[in-house]
Image: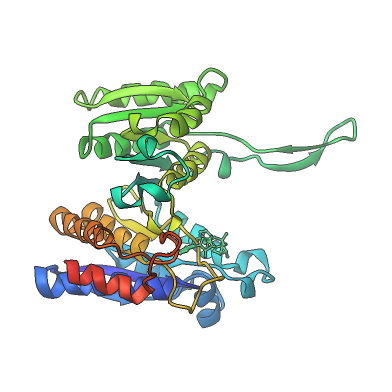
Amino acid sequence: MSRKILVLPGDGVGPEIIAEAVKVIDALKIGHGLDVELDEAAIGGAGYDAAGQPLPEATLAKAREADAILLGAVGGPQYDTLPRELRPERGLLAIRKELGLFANLRPALLYPELAEASTLKREVVEGLDIMIVRELTGGIYFGEPRGVHTCEDGEREGFNTLVYRESEVERIARAAFETAMKRGKRLCSVDKANVLEVSEFWREIVVRVSGDYPEVELSHMYVDNAAMQLVRAPKQFDVMVTTNMFGDILSDAASMLTGSIGMLPSASLNASGQGMYEPIHGSAPDIAGRGMANPLATILSASMLLRHSLGEAVLADRIDAAVGSVLGQGLRTADIAREGEAVASTAEMGAAVVAAL
Ligand code: NAD
């Protein structure tokens, strides 16, 4: 039976970059026996325009039915004055929550051809290949109580709560160990166990889960040191696992080691392996509609989709190799071109990847 991929183009450059990723999937259907059915729905500003909601009911219903979801990006200045609950970004948070997408996988991989695009020295980043596994649906971003109140002495106080249940830590730890098993079998758990009780608890559970993965070499690092090590010697890491907020910060730092936001994919998975895959960048309204966006992050998101939700590792490897080959040929969109280099359009880059397949 063919598997279902729901495509959510979204806003801004979303439809442009998604179109190129769909061409790649279509090419694999025709030429390499990939058996999938594609459907499309509106989310974000497009959802609001079509149905008055950033996550229309019909979109959520299709998402629940799908084996995997490929998302472009959401957001745009024309929606910034809407009430908060109708803003495009709400659609994204809502779909993550509704589908229980608790494990966010963010690779930071440097293609050798782009070593000069990093702000760090070539020898520090050349060969970089890290996977950050970030807990996405718990921790301080969701913890209660939260808010701002006035204390007895009349001074105001703001507060949030960093809270994790044992089952939440266990499932993200398992996701990270499973990821490490498919890679270099080294896992670094990042916490702040020297200061926070919840971090000590996190560490205790990660250690317990490690008993089920004797092949994986587990280490622990405090988050402040991890931030420093990521810019000092990032190649020491294979897989890192951490909480929602630490992961938010560290994964952005790690992604910039590779030089371009237009190159990096991500996956958000739930307990049954269903996932939503998207580039890490936003809707880039400044370049939308001009054929300038780099579609590679979205094409690489399609590769992650095949690998993690559909079990098609061979086809995912083909996409990754095709991207490497296109970069090797010297093709560059504006974001990764050096001064004076010829610049390819979004569609030219997509077509080149299809040709390289
Ligand atoms: P952004 O990631 O959209 O853009 C930041 C910069 O990177 C811009 O200069 C943009 O032109 C460039 N850029 C982004 N993607 C690119 C690509 N594929 N190729 C070439 N250049 C690219 O971030 P922003 O400008 O802060 O946000 C714009 C909108 O996107 C906002 O509405 C924001 O809320 C939304 N947003 C959405 C997501 C998401 O959908 N997951 C994530 C972040 C921001």
- Residue furthest to the top in view is 194
Pick the quarter of the image with the N terminus: bottom left
For residue 297, which quarter of the picture?
A: bottom left
For residue 265, which quarter of the picture?
A: bottom left
In the rendered image, the vertical position of residue 304 relative to residue 154, given as above or below:
below
Q: Horizontally, is 245 left or right of 273 in the view? A: right
Q: Horizontally, is 121 left or right of 302 in the view? A: right
Residue at 34 percent across and 33 percent down: it is 235
Query: x and y percent of residue 227 in the render?
Result: 50, 32
Q: Horizontally, is 64 left or right of 26 in the view? A: right
Residue at 42 percent across and 31 percent down: it is 166
Picture colour scheme: rainbow
Q: How many marks?
A: 0
In the rendered image, the vertical position of residue 149 relative to residue 73, given as above or below:
above
Residue at 34 percent across and 62 percent down: it is 296
Query: Foreground: 134 or 352?
Result: 352
Query: x and y percent of residue 28 in the render?
Result: 16, 69
Query: x and y percent of residue 89 in the render?
Result: 55, 62
Q: Can I make out residue 173 in this image?
A: no
Query: Foreground: 246 or 199?
Result: 246
Q: Horizontally, is 228 left or right of 211 in the view? A: right
- Residue furthest to the bottom in view is 50
Query: x and y percent of residue 150 in the render?
Result: 83, 38
In the rendered image, the vertical position of residue 248 relative to residue 228, given as above or below:
below
Query: Foreground: 166 or 92?
Result: 92
Query: Foreground: 200 or 10?
Result: 10
- Residue furthest to the right in view is 154
Pick the quarter of the image with the C terminus: bottom left
Residue at 35 percent across and 58 percent down: it is 277
